Image (cartoon, helix red, strand yellow):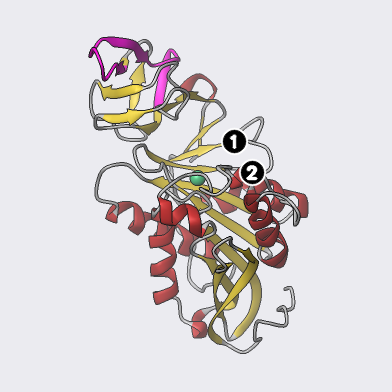
Amino acid sequence: MSSPPEHVSAQPGRERFSIPVSTLASGYALSIPVLAITGTKPGPRIGVSAMIHGDELDGLLIVRKLWRTIEPAELSGSLWLMPVANPLAMEAVTRNTPIDMLDMNRLFPGAPDGWLSEQQAHAITAGFINQVDRLIDIHAGGTFPWVDYCYVLNDEAFSRAFMSALLYKPTTMYPATTASAALARNIPITVVEIGGGYHDQAEHVRNGVRGVLNMLRHAGALPGPVEHRPCQLLLNEIKVMRPRHGGLCIPARQLTPGTWLDGGEKLADIVSPHSFDTLETMTTPFERNVVVLTRNYATRINPGDYAFMMGNSATAVWYD
Ligand SMILES: [Zn+2]
């Protein structure tokens, strides 16, 4: 177990602190809030971060519930919760940081003399990722898409304990993410993708809380038996489907992550908002597909945006 930094008490209980980043042009100080629960027994320090992307609210809702329900008396070690890793992006409901328009989750470990997003990434790396023994980074589909899967990176059992139906082991990760910073330290890291889109998020939040609590039991931070979800599907190949053209994305039907589709099935038309002509039709890419990310209602879409994600069943593996 790492010893706590000076600003965090080693005494059991709840406390809040902030990781300073910078002074904004308006003169206001920008800092990243952290909620710490210190348990009564020794154990690992586990970090849970949310809202690196400012349009992914589910992680914040999951962290809110964890903060309210986990008691120091039942916790071994400590839990550090970062509810809003990118406060300006959260305020603007944007994926990227509005001031420099950069995606902070492609800039880790960041730089103290870089763009604001690089400075934020640097502060989070030094003040959070480098201070924990395990990391869970929560993402979602964003304002329009809906997603439900969990990455398998360096600790398969830890990832499986989140209990997503779909797991994904990428051959190449996006560069310079929170996961890259955690992998560089060789600490167990799981990135979870849950919720988003135009519908009630309550079920995603419930599943997210249940999954994180199970991961905490798996890591020995909470007492009780670890739940096992049978029949999880490990995907080795996912196609991110980005339209060539922007406009309206009109889905062919409503889909749920985990649904199976044949090859060549129509997913959506991309329609011009000027002429209402169909600019392109998006169809399933593999012979047999499993839905990973979907858009279920007519939405605005940019060229190159996340429209759908489909897993390839030919390279997928079932777990017991
Ligand atoms: Zn994200």
Q: Which residue sits furthest front?
A: 26
Q: Is residue 223 left or right of residue 178?
A: left
Which residue: 68% across, 56% down?
119
**Disc 1: which residue:** 169
Which residue: 63% across, 36% down?
174
Which residue: 64% across, 43% down?
153
Residue 227, by quadrant, is: bottom left
The residue range painted magenta reads 267-290
26 up-or-down from 105: above or below: below
User: Is residue 188 in view from this perspective?
Assistant: no
Q: Is residue 277 magenta?
A: yes
Q: Amino acid at mark 1?
A: Lys
| Nearer the observer, 220 or 12 | 12
**Disc 2: which residue:** 153
Give the x, y percent position of residue 14.
52, 83
Q: Where does the N terminus fall, quadrant-wise?
A: bottom right
Which residue: 65% across, 71% down?
44
Q: Are marks 2 and 1 in contact (CB under 8 Å)?
A: yes
Give the x, y percent position of residue 239.
50, 23
Q: CA distance from mark 2 to mark 1?
A: 6 Å
| Nearer the observer, 87 or 58 | 87
264 up-or-down from 201: above or below: above
